[in-house]
Image (spheres, rainbow, N blue to C red):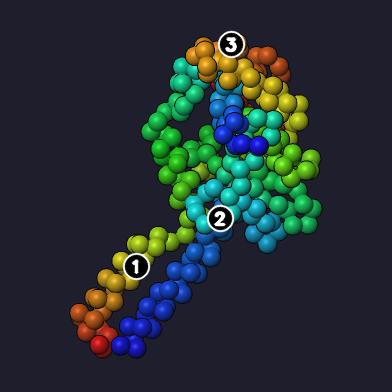
Amino acid sequence: MFTVIGLILLGLALYFLLKAKAPAQIFKLFQLNEALHDLVCSDLGSGHPRRRIYAMGVGGEPDAIFKVKRSGRIIVGEFKNRKHKGVVRRREFYQVHLYMGLAAINFKTQDVVGLLAFNDQCIEIAYDHELFEALIGLRSEVLSSMYKKRAQDSRPLHRRRSVTPRSRKIRFEGR
Amino acid sequence: MSTEKNLAVSKLAAYAEDPVAFVKAGGGAYNAKAARMGTAAHARIGAGPNKALFIVGMVIMIAALLYFKIIPV
């Protein structure tokens, strides 16, 4: 009987150990050192603090937000369940940019950086405030297009203004 | 400020990439199967052990150890 109770206690200890180690997977996904960063919130898995960020009529929940312990820099992490294959989709780039801009407003800092994680790679994205403003500027057009079920302007953003990745590692899919 | 009044980041990003494709998809996912797989992958990362599976595993292991008399009752 004592052996059975012992096994149950051992099982419980193992369960709570594995549960406590779960956030480590999120740090590993974004290639961040757990000792140097705090996980502010995450909607990956379950049991982590959640936080929805919004401003200017746009909102969402990034996959993870980290804070660098020493500098206070905010890192926005977004995961895409695909292989990188050398290209970043523009909508992925825009999504991270919107989250970075919203994080800058919500955390009252301009020291924001984005991480786009794929199944095989993690890419850093520098924040471009002008691009964030251009994206926010599309809000009413999106709502109007959804309401009228017709794009009010069929040109994608990169045909209206220059969209540069500011990193040699980022190459956009398509033209 | 109500979050319901906010436009989702993913929708705005998809529109900025291709307004015509976005409207054609009704503002939803372009590939429903890929979207389901993505949601499942997001749920797996950082989830930790499954409570129900863990309990079932423990019960089966202890029952087997008792049945084969590896541990005394």
Residue where numbered disc 1 is placed = B55
Give, as a three-letter code, the residue at label 1. Ile
Determine the image quadrant of residue A135.
top right
Q: Position of residue A5 (x, y in %)?
A: 36, 83
Q: Position of residue A4 (x, y in %)?
A: 32, 83
Determine the image quadrant of residue B53.
bottom left
In the image shown, does A18 or A55 lie closer to the viewer?
A55
Q: Quadrant of the C terminus of chain A?
A: top right
Residue shown at 24%/81% (left/top)? B66
Residue where numbered disc 2 is placed = A48
Neighbour tally class for label 2: few under 14, some 14-19, many 20 plus, Cα within 10 Å = some
For label 1, the SS is helix
- Chain on which label 3 sits: A
| CB contact under 8 Å: marks 1 and 3 | no
Residue where numbered disc 3 is placed = A152
Residue shown at 39%/63% (left/top)? B51
Give, as a three-letter code, the residue at label 2. His
- Chain on which label 2 sits: A
Q: In the rendered image of this protein, does residue A172 appear above or below residue A73?
A: above
| CB contact under 8 Å: marks 1 and 2 | no
